[in-house]
Amino acid sequence: MPQGRAVLALLAGALSSLPAARAAADQDWPEYLGGPDRGHYSALRQINASNVGRLRTAWVYHTGLLGQMQCNPIVVKGVLYGATGTSEVFALDAATGKPIWRYNVPGRLNPEPQNDRGVTYWTDGRSERILCTIDSWLYALDARTGAPVKDFGADGRASLKAGLGPQAQEKWVISTTPGTLYGDLIAMPTRVGEDQDAAPGFIQAFNVRTGTLAWTFVTIPYPDTPGYETWSKAAYKNTDVGSANCWAGMAIDRRRGILYVPTGSAAPDFWGGQRLGKDLFADSLLALDASTGRLLWCQQTVHHDIWDRDLPSPPVLVTLRHGGRAVDAVAQTTKTGFIFVFDRVTGESLFPIQEKPFPKSTLGGEEAWPTQPIPSLPKPYARQTLTEADISPYAENREALLAQLRSARTGLFQPFGKFPTILFPGFDGGGEWGGPAVDPDGILYVNTTNMAWVASMSDPARQADLALMSPGRRRYMQYCVSCHGPERRGLPAGGIPSLVDVGSRLRREEVLSLIGSGRKMMPGFTALPGEDRAAIVGYLFGDEPQPAAAAAPAAPEAPARIPYQFDGYNRWVDSKGYPAISPPWGTLSAIDLNTGEYVWTATLGEFRELSARGIPPTGAENYGGPVATAGNLLFIAATKDGMIRAFDKRTGRVLWKSELPAAAFATPSTYEVNGKQYVVVACGGTKLGTAPGDSYVAFALP
């Protein structure tokens, strides 16, 4: 009898985290990406394929903070909860866009953009809370007022470093994706660094009522625990190896109490000599007991990742017809364009997975894993190969691109070396953090970027050369060059700004703060001494004293812990800045997960100047995902061209589109208030060099 009461209590706790009754939930968008299954799906059908062409702007909310917004807002009982690009949290009347409350940490001046993707709503039927993250903290706010809940953690917040161990306390840890609820627990994704000083990416769950740490799942195993044998012996110490984190978000089967956690690569990203082996539980889909964090099963999607092939989005939960029976499944999209589909309970793949051989690494001390898991179905939704026939027919420097292709190494899972490697799909995928939508009948809709990048490794600057540099330039070459490049030019279209004229855009104090706090893709170098940060700033501002040419070499520093230097992120583009490969550069596909077969594929996005020349729509790079509705529609923004579109989800035909005030690299939400259905999207660009924005725009029928 006591055991039965315990089961009932656990079930009641799980149900308490549901944001509203079922009928209301069908009208709301109560959780990140629509629900615990992360399926981007709504049963609403007022807006449908027959009337979507009549959509008009219903309201616009300006946050007043320009930047990039990636938020998928939630809507509960007529209230919309969202975040600005700098993680200020707000509540709006979802029917009018009128502000209800807004929260920013007192004294938090000049906050940096964090790419915040949303918040989490919790209620026990009496109190209501918004769980959100700001910098390295998990906050609990009163959903009615926006005031911090004082008895949560310390004055309303709990540290995201609580379960990461002493080595992580001075390292950069934030969260940009909402947590996942199970009863009174919230499991939190985290972003950490990607170099040898990265914090570990352990999975943590906190008590929603108290803010205390409930459990931790260790993703870089300790000695005498499962998975330890798949790493170098000292990897767990977090001195030269870190990360293996979940930054993309999670899905949960609340009925079974199973949490599905996609993880990313171990750090450092591109040379794994200090983490030789398969590196479990990096690049894996984990099924954890949601109440304890105990591992139920694990499927690794990349062995010994040396390409930064993080699992980029939450998996989706769906029931499929397979082998003549209904199977509760979990499907995971990837940067490589593969979709892995597993039985939700057993972890067995629904389609055969073959371990295929791939090239060896040419870098000393590195040992690429000899095989990688390749699913037989579905076929990849991103293009996988490059030939000379794939060079863009619109490139004016086509011969130069051909020569570059002939001199480079290409192919899936080609290890980087001291030669150009064309990575395709590129660093951003393939599939990215927007993730796919899925219908209850098992049709999955996923957007794709077809973009190649050029990567290489080189020897780090010699000690003799470093000794002749100014202290600031020396530190820049050690900590900044891999992203911003030796000439400080960065990759502005990819979100890595040029530092050549940084003094004309930012004050010295702002740059000094940024080095410690991080920004967007850049981790914070919290462990870097203040004098080293100041030296880098002096170098960037051009007022650092230069050493005399004949000065004696400085005393040698300790050898570099990584014997190779990554040469930076470089999109492969033609002389006009367009992708070097032939279109389509962006697509949207419908895939039947019951059979693994494609239903349709459509081009997503365009360059208007090319279309004006009579060139068919080429597609464009895209970030943010689609939303599927029972009205036979797919809503998606995501593209560089700044449009939001509605596709007929049965055919892939565009039925409606509207220009937004700024490109929307965010997944829309749809909901109903007072009998009217709305579609809302956060509009804030800058990811691909687009203009910044500050608005949430909602559409409805007149």
Image (cartoon, rainbow, N blue to C red):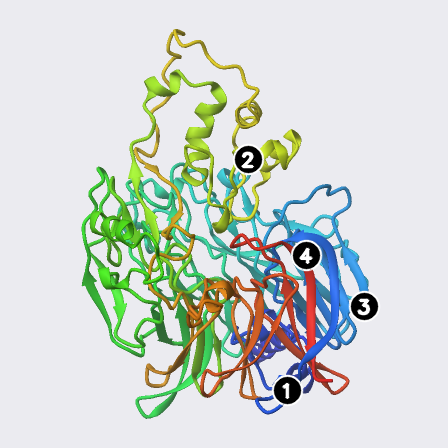
Q: Earlier in the sequence, mark 1 or mark 4?
A: 1
The answer to whether residue 558 is above or below residue 215 is: above
Check disc 2 and report the residue beneath it.
Answer: 526
Q: Earlier in the sequence, mark 2 or mark 4?
A: 4
Check disc 1 and report the residue beneath it.
Answer: 47
Residue 79: percent from left, percent from top: 75, 72
Answer with left or right where residue 528 lies relative to residue 225.
Answer: right
Question: Nearer the viewer's eye, disc 1 or disc 3?
Answer: 1
Q: Quadrant of the C terminus?
A: bottom right
The answer to whether residue 373 is above or below residue 362 is: below
Q: Is residue 635 visible?
A: yes
Residue 149: percent from left, percent from top: 76, 57
- Marks 3/2: CA–CA distance: 39 Å
The answer to whether the residues at label 3 and label 2 have Cβ atoms under 8 Å apart is: no
- Marks 1/3: CA–CA distance: 23 Å
The answer to whether the residues at label 1 and label 4 have Cβ atoms under 8 Å apart is: no
Tag 4: Cα neighbours inside 10 Å, few (<14), some, or many (≥20)? many
Q: Secondary structure at mark 1?
A: loop
Q: Earlier in the sequence, mark 1 or mark 2?
A: 1
The answer to whether residue 468 is above or below residue 378 is: above
- Marks 3/4: CA–CA distance: 15 Å
Q: Earlier in the sequence, mark 3 or mark 2?
A: 3
Check disc 3 and report the residue beneath it.
Answer: 98
Check disc 4 and report the residue beneath it.
Answer: 84
The kind of residue tagged 4 is Thr
Residue 551: percent from left, percent from top: 40, 7
Residue at left 56%, top 23%?
Answer: 538
Question: Nearer the viewer's eye, disc 1 or disc 2?
Answer: 1
The answer to whether the residues at label 1 and label 3 have Cβ atoms under 8 Å apart is: no
Q: Earlier in the sequence, mark 1 or mark 3?
A: 1
Residue at left 18%, top 49%?
Answer: 360
Q: Earlier in the sequence, mark 3 or mark 4?
A: 4
